[in-house]
Image (cartoon, rainbow, N blue to C red):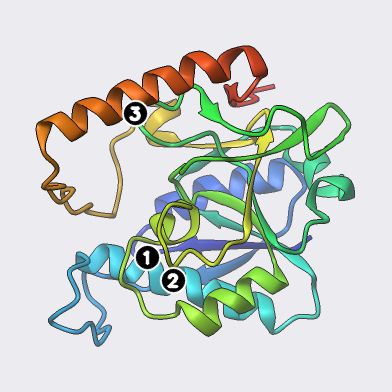
Amino acid sequence: MKIYLINLTRRPDRLAKMDSALKALGLPYTRVEAVDGATADMGQPVSNKLPATGYACYLSHLKAYRAFLETPDSHCVILEDDVALSPRLPEALSASDLHTDKNAILRLEAPTNVHWRKPSYSLPLAVASQNGLASYKLLTKSYGTGAFVISREVAEDILAHQAQPTLHIDVRLFHQQYEDHLGFNILQINPALAIQRQYSEGVKDSDIMHTPPERSGKHPMQKNIEANLQRIFRILARPFGFIRRFPFAEK
């Protein structure tokens, strides 16, 4: 399975780290030159509210998907240049049972937010398993586009229907609650085989400036009711196995 590594030209340090890590695992890759939000003229409309770096990241992903679709391959791996990789990654990529769903993205990285050690919600039983690795269907959003397997069908769908950046790429791909999500499955590998270095090593080196969340405008009583319902759901879901942690496989 081919690997496409998205890398900014002005970040040779990151490329060197990824090159060393991938070579150590015996994994060849193709570098995709990232669109640079700091210097490139991207033609971003004035009305577009994404920061330039987020807009550029979205365009960089689309560039990688187009490179993938120029091949006859059914699946590929998309990597960003700021992830740490598990030694188990090669066996996962050769485990064909884990990536047979043509209507899915298989997340390889641990949930990448400040709560990445906290549990996520998924179907209780594995969708597929092989060689001690398993994939689970996620039921809730899980941000981060550092490492995932994408199918040809999903890549074509994104380019056909959502090639205009209006959201951060991880929100576009992995926030299932958005009405215009394309409906493909989001699978999570367990254990995770990549993690952004800012979380595993405490390196604050992101090139993307995130926009602050908009205020919901909800009444405090409504917020309180929703919070209580979420607590009840967590209590009810735990015995049935819907709550699961996806740790990073360091060994």
Residue at image mark 1: 57
- Image height of 26 relative to 1, above or below: above
Residue at image mark 3: 114
Q: Label 3: few (<14), some or many (≥20) within 10 Å?
A: few
Residue at image mark 2: 60
Please provide percent x and percent y for residue 31.
57, 67
Pointers 1 and 2 in contact (C-beta within 8 Å): yes
Q: Amino acid at mark 3?
A: Val
Q: Residue at x 33, y 63 (%)?
A: 10
Q: Nearer the viewer, residue 106 or 71?
A: 106
Circle nearer the N terminus (2, 3)? 2
Pointers 2 and 3 in contact (C-beta within 8 Å): no
Dot 2: what SS?
helix
- Image height of 248 relative to 207, above or below: above
Give the alpha-carbon distance from disc 2 to disc 3, as whole Å. 24 Å
Circle nearer the N terminus (1, 3)? 1
4 sits left or right of 221 in the view: right
